[in-house]
Amino acid sequence: MLDLVWLIPALPLAGFICILLFGRKLGDPKAGYFATAMVGASFLVTVGVFADMMSKTAEERSHLRTLFQWIPVGSLKVDLALLADPLSITMCLFVTGIGTLIHLYAVGYMHGDSKFSKFFLYLNLFAFSMLMLVLGSNMLVTFLGWEGVGTCSYLLIAFWHQKDSAATAGKKAFITNRVGDWGFMMAMFFAFWAVGSLDYSVINHSLLSTSTATAIALFCFIGACGKSAQLPLYLWLPDAMEGPTPVSALIHAATMVTAGVYLMCRISPVLEIASNYAGWIIAIIGAATAFYAATIAVAQNDIKKVLAYSTVSQLGYMFLAVGSGAYTAALFHMITHAFFKALLFLGAGSVIHGMHHEQDMRRMGALRKLMPITAITFIIGWLAIAGVPPFAGFWSKDEILLFAYDKSPILWFVGLVTALLTAYYMTRQVIMVFYGKARWNDAHEEHGAHGDTEPHESPWMMVTPLMVLAVLSIVGGAINLPFSHTTERLVTWLEPVVVVRESTTAKLPLAIIAIVVGLVGIGLAIIVYAKHRVKAIEPQILADAWGYDRAVSNFMGGPGRQAFDGLAWADGHVVDGAVNGTGALVRSIAGKVRKLQTGNVRTYAAAIGAGVVLLLMWFVVVRGIL
Amino acid sequence: MIAAIATPTTTWYLLLGAVLFSIGVIGVMVRRNPLILFMCVELMLNAVNLTFVALARRFGDIGGQSTVFFVMVVAAAEVVVGLGIAVAILRRKPHATTDDMAELKG
Amino acid sequence: MGALFAATLQGPKIDWFALSPLLLLLGGAMLLLVGGALTPPWPKHGYALFTSAIAIAAGVCGVLLWYRIDDKGPVRLVGNALSLDKVGLWLTITMCVGVFLAALVSDDYLRREDLDGPELYSLSLLAALGGIVMSSANDLIVLFLGLEILSISLYVMAASHRKRIESQEAGLKYFVLGGFSSAFFLYGVALVYGGAGSTNFDQIVAAFDATVQLDRQNDALVLAGVALLLVGLAFKVAAVPFHFWSPDVYEGSPTPVTAFMASVGKTAAFGAMLRVLLLALPHWRDDYRPALWVIAVLTLVGGSVMAVVQTNVKRMLAFSSISHAGFILVGVEAAAHGTGATLSTTGVSSVLLYLLIYSVLVIGTFGVVSAVGRTGDANTGLAGFRGLGKNQPALALGMTVLLLAQAGVPLTSGFIAKFGVITAAVDVHSYAIALIAMVSAVIAAFLYLRIMVSMWVSEPEAGDDTREPVRVPALLGVAISLSVAFTLVIGFLPGRLIDIAP
Amino acid sequence: MIKFPILTLLVLVPAAGAAIVALISKRQPDLVKVVAMIASVLTGGMALWVLFAFKSQNADFQFVSQHVWIKPWGISWHLGVDGISLFLVVLTGVLFPLVIIGIDPHHDHKRYLSWMLLLEAGVMGSFISLDLFLFFVFFEIVLVPMYFLIGGWGYDDRIYAATKFFLFTMVGSAFMLVGIISTAVLAKAGPGGSVTFDLIKIAENATFAASTGRWLFFAFAIAFAVKVPLFPLHTWLPDAHTQAPTGGSVILAGVLLKMGTYGLLRFGVYLFPEAAVWARPLFLTLAVIGILWGAVAATMQTDLKRLVAYSSVAHLGFIVLGTFALTTVAITGSVMQSVNHGISTGALFLMVGMIYERRHTREISKLKGLQKAAPVFAAAFMVIMLSSIGVPGLNGFVGEFMILIGSFGTARWWVAVAASGVIFAAVYLLWAYQRVFHGEPDDDNKTFPELKWKEATLLLPFISIIVFAGVFPKPMLSRIEPSVNKLITHIEERSDWRAPQPTVGVRPLEVESAVTDSAEDGEG
Amino acid sequence: MELFVFIVAAAMVLVGAVGVVVRKHPVHAALSLVMTLFGIAVLFVAQEAHFLAAVQVIVYAGAIVVLFLFVIMLLGVDNAEDLHIEPFRVQRPVAAAVGSGLVTIIGLAIIASRKATVPVVTQSQAVQDAALDPHDGNIRALARDVFSDHVLAFELTSVLLVIAVVATVMLARKPKPGELVIIETPVSVK
């Protein structure tokens, strides 16, 4: 069964090609179902592979499947090869699993869109790229997927390209990611010239010098920052919400954005060799991002923006874990986060769908009666992310905080505050959307364009995924319970591939503190938004994301653009000016010289005479008499 | 006995030739009447002739003299042709000077 | 006494066959003059065809003599006055080709301008005779006489267009300046004579072989002579700063005459230059080489730069021929690196190659100009060429080939010529001048492009179609196509020609 | 088969075609087209035949044919292909038929086609000639048809552009001619004694003093730097591209510029290894500057075609970078990239041409929302653009990546900067794409016609090559690499250059142990 | 005695020459030319070139100058040229510079090499015999030289004369009616 690993990406690819050829014919909704089926099939294959792998001993669980030589030249031998090992298969499981659900969801969500089939075309392409990313046996194949998902996210964010905001957001995403890709490429260059290969097997098992390892680690991290929206490159993710909600759920919450974390875990042995300030940098940036994004999320009114910033913040958590050496914790949180964040996004999507594409939470409220399933599932997701036991989020987040404490109490504290904020803004969101009094009626005075003013529950293919994900969000934590070594299934599972650290700190106190903090956050939110005891604190600066985004765009539009213009000017006037100048010079000289050509014989005679005298001087005076 | 003081050597003749030649050159440069230009060219040729003869004397070589003979013929031919051209022009543009013949320029 | 006289005066023995090219040209000229004067006007094409026949005959004799040299070796003629060697013969043949093509070009032009008659043709034959004398002379006086023969005929030819005052102005200018400069040349001859006691090349060399080594500084006189000789020759080849006459004269003269000057005139002048500098004054190489270098550079740059701003095609081509002269001077400069009184260097052969190729090229080009110039040479401006690509594609194509050749684009003879010269220069390690030459060739290319643009690209303007149509009469067509063919053939297969170049 | 003078025919067939087309009367336009088509297709076929008959894993020149041409100067008609030139030859053979059949010059078909065929002959020749003189002949002759194509069928400012192109390139060639002659003359001293212009003889036998070699190298390099074009000699390119007719631009970007990069390899590095090694820093720096400069300038263009032109400057910067990195990987990448750039930029020019056909403007500001009006058209453009940006899985990436990773070992800091060019590429192309294709089309652009079948069939070969070369470049690499290896060894024999090999990974006994102890010294 | 002759003749030559250059009136200039030519002739005699002296007087002073005068009168161009005005300001300074430069440099050269070794000239047999002749050796020697060593040059001069003839025929031919456009320009006093 392991040999069939190639089927996992192949099926979505096949789906892509088929839709490319027959998409128009299939149309709405057949194309959607077809795509879903493809991803679903690849999920089944993954399950098969997974089962097969389970049946093997830990040593022989990683399996290399070489398809063909991709770039064989000189000392650079890159194969297009897939590596099935616990890590990649775990990724595949939730990528294909959640992927299937979201495909299904999208069938309902995109119903009636003029470019229905094209949407699934991109979606399948994305699934393929993502699977290549995780299955790649060397950095270059990963990079192939890496860039592929980037391109797909560009296409999908700008899916409604008539909207300038969408187009711009797509472009922004791609370019910001490219900045990260630069880092990724540099990392590859270092790795190649250090070990003569790009295969993880070689890189991870080579005795690298500390400096090289640090370089590889940090450059990879730059790449991860781009892909996983960490400071300072997170900018694109909030804007990416311009894309259809399923896209936000699949790409910008569950799968693609976690690629950075995956990469760091993939090369965890290198990180271990790297001098330890590398770890510090990663951890600090992670913590900072987590806190920073959380503060922003507090003041957002767009239902998806809140989730976007929360995603950034949660990713920050994961990097905090990576930086603290808790790769398993990071992966654990990545999985649970995938569950509940996908859930939340899909819920939000369902709300938006029900509200006829209304995204402003101030125009919502009291929706729980109108769309019960959405509401319930959403609330489950909320509890999960808020870190309320026994929901999935609690376990993973707790794990991370634990290791953060090992690294340094300060990091731990920042994480804790972030947890509090998370609980706070998520509660705020739930209240604004599902409780309080319905504000959507007055909303429709302005744009009552839609037929029925009544929000409605979404069709089955949208709510089914919600329910499935809700279940997962509840029980998801079970894959890695911290009680005993046997219950830490994920850790034992990943041990052969990923470096595993043992935490020294007592788990329980920290856990209790975390729970308390979470509850406090919820409580505060209820006081502020449900009971209205306290005036909400939503300073503009937070709504504007600390003005960082604007500052950047101002710089790009201002000095940056001027610099570019200046260079373009220089190209035309200095470099080319020199060229044209030469021509002009020749002409002007000629213009002057032709004045000598007076047409008068006597002038000519004078010229000849002068020439004679000069020649005579040379010959007689210089050569002769002297 | 004056002769004893100084008999003009070849050098004297050569110098005279040089001066005469330069006078001719100057003439060509300053005069505007084509005919006088021709005369100045004649002056130059004569200077050369003088030089030849003087040198021939110095070497005791007759070749120099025959050269002068040829030069005279050349001079004659030149004058004829020159006058021919001058006539052709002056017929059309009476009183034309070389300064008037400066249509072609630049 | 009489007995003594009779006894002792035996003139030098004369090898008539060796003189046959000269004699043919002379005889032809006489026939034209006398016959032309005594008989009623000859039928159409008569004069031209006769002239070209004479030229061909002379050329053929030249070729025969070439083979004679192959087995007998070079000889001196008429008491050391002339020397029959391959260099001289090559130039002789070149000039015969020039006369031949020029005659074909002249034919219709003269009838069009109502100047038809034997005089111009006979003058061209005589001029060629003078040129041949120059380029095979072995005595400064003979060379001077040849020079005068050539120049005087050219003065007359330049002034021969009775209807165009420009033509006569050109004649006058050329005459005055020509006389002026040949006076300098003659003075140079005198001064060299003063140092050597003879005007015969062999004796000059011999004399200096004896004296030069011992008292070098006493030869200021000879050095002055060399300078003046150089002036005379530089004037003839129109080298900057002695070039001023050539644009005006080229523009003013009847176009076929311009073609004749640019080919035969230049060829003869360079032949003379080679002989004087290399055969008569080899001892003064180190003195005149730097001067040559400077003059060559000035000529190259000056010619091409000044061409840039011109708008009259004849004038453009005049300047371009100046910069071509510069190229040839590069070859001469290279030749001046050798040792001893010899003409057998790569420099010389590159010059000869260039001269032959350029002669053909330039006559073809001016041939086109004479057709496009239309009656009275009225349309020699760039505007005259507008729309030629549409109305006379064949002619325009031919002109394009010729211009590209002048620009030195590969697969044309022009490139071969430039290549040879540059090779010669590089051979003697004068890289600087080679580079300057090539770069100035680029500047010159600009003007050829301008002509091509106006032929092919320029939009027609109002009144273009009312202009007199461009006619390409038979003989002119033959001349142009011959030169185009030559240009291309040599461009593709130069091997043989390079082989035989002495 | 070897005796069959296939390469000679590669040059002669188009040349003959040009002549025939020129001779056919204007009144038979169809005949003209047919002849041109036959000639170009025939050439393309032969080129492909060469591709398939070419023995891979063979470093030597193949299909060599040599005949004496100009004996007294030791010049011979010497042709041959090796891995470095093979794909350029094929590219030329494929590109021309597409252009000749696919693009309509609108007027004077006869002259246009005959110039085109002449151009093809010249380009072919310069890629396969192994004789300095012969190469120069072709290299120079190419200017003439290109000049007339730009001048005759170009846009408003065409005369200026054409003249600039002609003179600029000619200045370069002026230096090269002197260089060529000096090379031959100086090499004469070596064994044999007689002058020869034969590339291989000179490269293998002649030995130049270091200083001489450097001068000669620069004489050549200037010409090629102009042709490439390398910053700061690039300013003729935007004008020429913008003013040239679509066909001209495609050819110019597709193959003409490659004569420069190819020349640098074949007549710069191969002929004067010592000088090339010595001059590395200069060329690397210029290349990198070119990458950034071109990208930034491209970003600021308001004319779509001009933008693509500047993107060429950037891309060719990569190629030069790889060339002077002097490692197998990098140079192979450069050769590969020469071809890729030809494909993708050529295709871009094609599509810009189509846009111009439809809208009669190239002003980005006048175009808007074309993707809504013509989705398929937009999709095609998108694919080509992505390949030009260098997205993995498409051809653009493979070459670029090989160049960068190959150069990293010998030019680390240059690569660090150059790699950022990848970002800029995304910036200017995506921005342009957004402005042109995204948004709501205004009234002028609403009616923008969709991709026609003819155009689609014209684009299909490009796109399929783009994808194929991106996914499975091995066939190309296996043909290119041997020659490159040979070149590298040639350099190493003739200079103190040693192409570094990456230190192959050492496997410790146990991962953890390695981890722990090295982690400790990490702490220390 | 010889010194006296030289001085007088030189004076004639120079005065005449200067006259040619400075006399406004072409006729006067022509007459000054005659003076120069006579002076030259005298110097020829002093240099034992009797035949040339004769030819000088007959051909030059006689024929050529007369030809000049004839043309002047024929065309009625005997109008004075105003030498006070010089349209090109630089012209005369340049002329002066060139002239003086020439004199100085060539003069220097002449003086520098006045002691130069006189080359040995080998005369052809015919000429040597002529020198033995008691009668005027000069003319005879000249004749023999011309007809032996320089016979080709001599023949070439004949060609020159032919050309001169053709030239006059072509240029001075009476123009066909309507062919001659008289462009009357005022006496140039530029």
Image: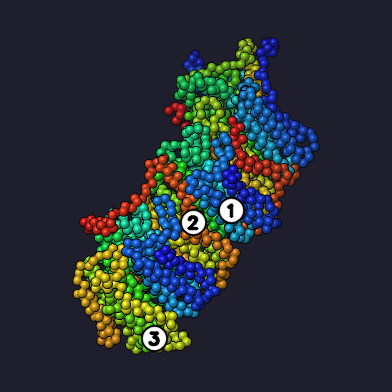
Residues flagged by tags 3 and 1 on a common chain: no
Query: Regarding mark 2 in the picture, which secondary structure is present there?
Result: helix
Q: Position of residue D262 (x, y in %)?
A: 49, 49
Quarter of the image containing the N terminus of chain A?
Answer: bottom left
Count of residue discs: 3
> Quick one: C190 or C338, which is closer to the camera?
C338
Q: Position of residue B77 (x, y in %)?
A: 66, 30
Disc 3 residue crowd, few under 14, some 14–19, many 20+, Cα 10 Å: some
Q: Which residue is mark 2?
A: D340
Q: Residues within 10 Å of mark 1 (few under 14, many from 20)?
A: many
Amino acid tagged 1: Gly
Quote the CA–CA distance across marks 3 and 2: 54 Å
Q: Is D97 or C170 nearer to us in this picture?
A: D97
Of C242 and D448, the residue lying toward us: D448
Labels 2 and 1 share a subunit: yes
Residue C314 image-quadrant placement: top right
| Residue D44 disc label | 1
- How busy is the neighbourhood of tag 2: few (under 14 within 10 Å), some, or many (20 plus)? many
On the picture, is A558 further left or further right than C402? left
- For the question of whether residue D175 can be seen, the reply is yes
User: SS class of the residue under badge 3?
Assistant: loop
Task: Answer with the quarter of the image where residue C412 lies.
Answer: top right
Of callouts 2 and 1, the N-terminal one: 1
Above or below residue A569? Residue A526 is below
Give the residue type at disc 3. Answer: Met
